[in-house]
Amino acid sequence: MLSGTATPASEITRKVGDFGTQEFVAKRGESGATASLKDAFRDRFYVGTAINRAITTGAGGLRRSPEQVAKDIAQVKEQFNQVVAENEMKWALIHPRAGANGYDFASADAFVNFGLSNNMYLVGHTLVWHAQTPQWVFAGTNPPPAGVTNSTARAFANTNTFGTNRFGRGGFGFGPYTGPRASREELLERMRDHIHTVVGRYKGKIKVWDVVNEALADGGTNVLRKSLWLEIIGPDFIAKAFQYAHEADPEAILRYNDYSLENPAKRHKLITLIRSLQEQKVPVHAIGSQAHLNVSTGYEEMDQALTEMATLGLPIHITELDVNSAQGGQRTTGADISSNATTTQGGLVSDADRKLAEAYAGLFRAFIKHEKSVKVVTFWGPNDANSWRANGKPLLFDGNNQPKPAFAAVIAEAKKANAVK
Ligand code: G3I
């Protein structure tokens, strides 16, 4: 088991069942579930969820009434022993402005307090990402040389042309940055200040950090995605970020996090990147595999992916698990917000509940098979109503906090495995 304390579930008692195995006997919680994920997998890995500001503060959310949020909170406490902030620690939210007063810790502090007071294993997401980073971070402090206007400076700089229409271009109201750029030294100093301040503030409390998020290129032969981090600093922006995070909290588990690692080509890029970091003795301690999947991804693909990733010798954390049940969602396993909007149109696959249950059962069989490597499994939201792709109904609980057949299928996999342990 990992270091750190997993919450003992007070409402759940275990007894030795007829097969000499652990049975889970539980009072019915808010969800009506008669078992909890955190207890079912207690001896194998943490089971966690992303949570948002509505849950950590108890306030009504954009899409949830205060009553619904109260049920979400009860469900998070009942089912999970690990949490990560879905948005609140992204640069644009925690560090929106330059200068001494540029940080805004209120929502991140609420997240940390929620996790600590519920005795949960805390993960921080995310320090360096091409998305959700304010424009000022990339802007040069020196004016353009005399006679060069901002627009000519823009042309000189061959400024940011992100290759895709990922939400990384903007989001939270920020467009792509096209002005005069910071120097390498300037940007490294901003990155160092950001990482030292944020990681330092939660030192000893947040046990795991997503240090660099989604730096790999999706297609083509380039290993790294085109981003302002890469263009201004160079490929060593990744090593530098890990170095700064390690300085700020030498005990924290530092994670490289990316999506579509079930895709062999992208996975090979991951292996190339991590091997190179390991050769340079960069303190990268875990692989984060997001696992934004669809119902056609099952045991075989996950088994293959975990087998290959395990050759790196690092713990593997499944960081953002969800399984899209939408018809259009069957074409992609990407994490792109804009393409996600199109692929969740057109209704659910027929017999969606059964297919979702089969997919989840296969995935958890693979996680259990690889339990020596898989140390954390985090769902990207506690239930369908909280999901970034709610229309795809991708989680184990529905929008009324009720367990779906996929929940029973996942618990059944745990029971099967516990029976032979
Ligand atoms: O909070 C504002 C609100 O004030 C405003 O009125 C509203 C109007 O658009 O936007 C709200 O912000 C949204 C935010 O989620 C909170 O709901 C942003 O527009 C929206 O872009 C943002 O999306 C998040 C996305 O990352 C981009 O940061 C999703 O919630 C979040 O689930 C998603 O998570 C990412 C991981 O961080 C990295 N891996 C992929 C994963 C899924 O895309």
Image: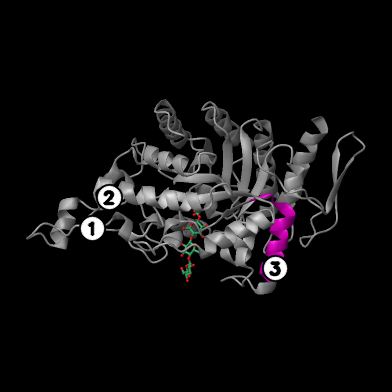
The amino acid type, in three-letter code, at marker 2 is Glu
| Numbered badge on residue 383 | none
Q: Nearer the viewer, residue 384 or 286?
A: 286
Q: Which residue is mark 3?
A: 70
Amino acid marked by disc 1: Thr
Residue closer to the observer: 301 or 23: 23
Answer yes or no: do the residues labelled 1 and 2 have beta carbons within 8 Å?
yes
- Decide: few, some or many residues near mark 2? Use Cα within 10 Å; few <14, some 14-19, many ≥20: some
Residue at mark 1: C-beta within 8 A of ligand 1: no
Q: Main secondary structure of the magenta part?
A: helix
Any magenta on residue 73?
A: yes
> Is residue 360 or residue 156 the one in the foreground?
156
Q: Does the rendering let one see residue 281?
A: yes
* Residue type of the residue flagged with mark 3: Ala
Q: Disc 3 or disc 2, which is closer to the eye?
A: 2
Q: Which residue is mark 2?
A: 186
Whether residues under marks 1 and 3 lie with C-beta atoms below 8 angstroms apart, the answer is no
Chain-order first, disc 3 or disc 2: 3
Real-space Cα separation, disc 3 to disc 2, in angstroms: 44 Å
Q: Position of residue 168 (x, y in %)?
A: 39, 55
Report crowding for label 3: few under 14, some 14 to 19, many 20 or more residues within 10 A (C-alpha).
Answer: some
**Which mark is first along the chain, 2 or 1?**
1
Image quadrant containing the C terminus: top right
Q: Secondary structure at mark 1?
A: loop
Q: Residue 279's spot in the image, x, y percent? A: 41, 26
What residue does disc 1 label?
Answer: 141
- The colour mode here is one colour
- The picture quadrant where one finds residue 78 is bottom right
> Where does the magenta region start and end?
68-82
Beta carbon at label 2 within 8 Å of ligand 1: no
> In screen coordinates, is 279 left or right of 66?
left
